[in-house]
Amino acid sequence: MAALPRSFYGRPPAEVARALLGAILVHATPDGLLSGRIVEVEAYLGEVDPGSHAFRGPTTRNAVMFGEPGRLYVYRSYGIHTCANVVCDADGTAGAVLLRGLEPLTGRDIMRRHREGREDIANGPGRLCAALGITLKDNGLDLTGSRIWIEGGERPDAIGQTTRVGLTRGRELPLRFFVLGNPHVSRGRPS
């Protein structure tokens, strides 16, 4: 299958978040092709969202969020976990969707090795990046390219919606979406 076009990402974050559920995230690594079905996401609304990295405007860290939709915004959370977001909304308007949970499809053994043999391979944003080998060097990567991309997939039968996980500001916004009943959804508790 082909990568989703840039126009897919040029929509409001909550709309893109829902549309990403069931899509396939793919990373072509030197070790082999890794892929998984996206089963959990969180939308971040940019400068109007106190939970967003873009809330206080552009910085060196969040500059990718204010750029072209269809890019990967990668950052380190609490100095420990690497997290990946899909940049969306209009060019120049910050918006992003955090990739929180992935159901491994291709390269499961490689992903497990990346996660040091753990069975909970990609159920959480840090675990997802570790399993797929996504690093800070991937910040700004074009998702319409040929190294990391997202393909269309099967729409889930039922989608759950809650507040986002682990926030102190903007925690009341119901912007976490997940595939109901999927065992690869993280165990993070909504705020």
Image (cartoon, grey):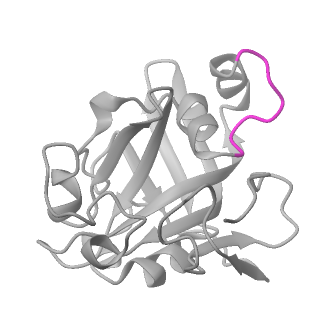
Quick check: 117 above or below 14? Answer: above
The image position of residue 14, as x and y in percent, is 47, 81
Work out whether residue 104 or residue 119 is closer to the camera in this orientation and state it. 119
Quarter-wise, where is residue 157 in the image?
bottom right
- Measuring 36% from the left and 39% from the top, which residue is drawn there? 75
For the question of whether residue 1 can be seen, the reply is: no
64, 112: nearer the viewer: 64
Residue at coordinates 24% horizontally, 51% vertically from top-left?
142
Residue sitting at 58 percent across and 64 percent down?
41
What main secondary structure does the magenta stretch of the protein show?
loop
Residue 60 sits in quarter: top left
> Could you tell me residue 2's position as x and y percent?
41, 61
Provide the residue span drawn in magenta: 116-123
134 to the left or right of 164: left
Up the image or down, 127 lies above or below 3; here it is above
Q: Is residue 117 on the magenta stretch?
A: yes
Left or right? Give the position of 63 relative to 170.
left
Left or right: 127, with 2 as reference point: right
Residue 187, how many percent across, how many down?
A: 80, 51
Q: Quadrant of residue 113?
A: top right
Q: In front: 171, or 25? A: 171
The residue closer to the viewer here, 103 or 174, is 174
Does residue 105 lie above or below 6 as drawn? above
